[in-house]
Image (spheres, rainbow, N blue to C red):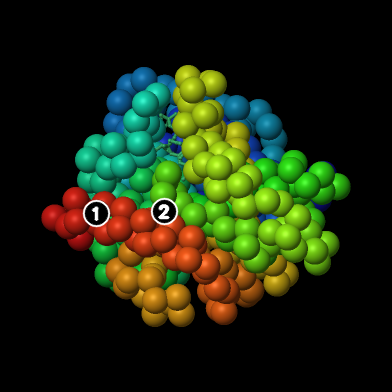
Amino acid sequence: RFMTSSVQPVRVAVTGAAGQIGYALLPRIAAGEMLGPNQPVILHLLERDDPKALAALEGVVMELQDCAFPLLRGVVATSDINKAFDSVDYALLVGAKPRGPGMERADVLKDNAAIFKVQGRALNESAKKSVKVCVVGNPANTNAMIAAANAPNIPATNFTSMMRLDHDRAMAQIALKLGASSVADVEKLVVWGNHSATQYPDLSNAVIKGKSVAKNVDQEWVRNTFIPTVQQRGAAIIKARGVSSAASAANAAIAHVRDWVLGTNGRIVSMGIPSDGNPYGVKEGLLFGFPVTCQNGQYKIVEGLQWDEFGKGAIERTIKELQEEKDAVKHLL
Ligand code: NAD
Ligand code: LMR
């Protein structure tokens, strides 16, 4: 607990740091859950230039101090975006408006898209060129595409969006249905496409301890229960809580970055990444949920998975929606 690491600290930016996801995320990053138990961190916390948001941020900083995390080597708390992104190695772009009951995630596109243009530019100016970016703020895929387009000096492949919450939700539903002893036994699941109601949670290749999931569930359950439950889970949580998911979203962000940086040991996870040059023929220029494995800090698309006719239709729908979102923000690209 009190051992000090001699490893150099890395800088992690989190935007919207005083929001509800920020509150669930920051202690876990500072505890080493994202980058490992030997990696010290300096947190760079960005909030809006608004007295209430900045007062709340001050409270978050006090609580981080009070946790006495051995790996936490400094906190920069600011509303100055260039200070927030100065020399950062990682950026979790969370700060954005959440949707409310009855809304789709694309309904916040108009309000949120501009944020990601500004943040893409600021990352370009201030962050390390190797910065790894995970976009959480909705609509996450299109926001990540906007940020990448505004950061010409950072490789576009460094901009990813979070599909991991959808992935983990789908794993949990399968484990519950088939009584798996652990969710971790579910493998080879993919959530393709957009982090939205058109996403395609695809269990056709999934296995539990080597046994096909598809062969042990009926198609009626897959199409009428499993897929809609995963697609609509965010809305179900908003309906139940009055506000959107936070603990599970923070958990997914930790898992996304941890796996990207520390590797997946051959396991498949879903990440939103640029569609350029993918083996599945998804139109280039979209930010799309794909199956990947990660090793040595790099993600790699898993090739060779097949879609049946139903799957092809689902993929077409999610591509169409992403294209429409892209068209709606073309002035920011
Ligand atoms: P929240 O309203 O509790 O917090 C957002 C915070 O961001 C606020 O403190 C706000 O002041 C700040 N903020 C807004 N604009 C900012 C800007 N330009 N720069 C810096 N800070 C800014 O919201 P939340 O529940 O934490 O959710 C944040 C976002 O994450 C929402 O868009 C939500 O829809 C999204 N989300 C995505 C996923 C996913 O799976 N991709 C999951 C859950 C939530
Ligand atoms: C989620 O999936 O929980 C988040 O994207 C929040 C939302 O708006 O559904």
Looking at the rendered image, the quarter that the N terminus falls into is top right
User: Mark 1 or mark 2: which comes first in sequence?
Assistant: 2
In front here: 129 or 100? 100
Query: Which numbered marker is on residue 194?
Result: 2
Q: Amino acid at mark 2?
A: Asn
Q: Which of the image's four quarters has the C terminus?
A: bottom left
Vertical side of 102 occupied by 142: above or below: below
| Ligand 2 neighbours mark 1 (CB distance < 8 Å) | no
Residue under the image location 48 percent in, 60 percent down: 310
- Crowding at dot 1, Cα within 10 Å, few <14 / some 14-19 / many 20+, comes out as some
Residue 27 lies in what quarter of the image? top right
Residue 159 placement, left or right of 21: left
Residue 9, relative to residue 111: is it above or below? below
Q: Are marks 1 and 2 in contact (CB under 8 Å)?
A: no
| Residue 307 image offset from top left, x and y in percent | 52, 69
Identify which amino acid the numbered label 1 is placed on.
Glu
Q: Which residue is mark 1?
A: 324
Vertical placement of 28 versus 306: above or below?
above
Residue drawn at the location 31% of the way across and 53% of the way down = 321
Residue 76 on image: x %, y %: 46, 42
- Quarter of the rendering containing residue 79: top left
Q: Relative to the observer, which residue lies in front, 75 or 47?
A: 47
Residue 148 placement: quadrant = bottom left
* Alpha carbons under labels 1 and 2: distance apart: 12 Å
Residue 55 shows in the view: yes
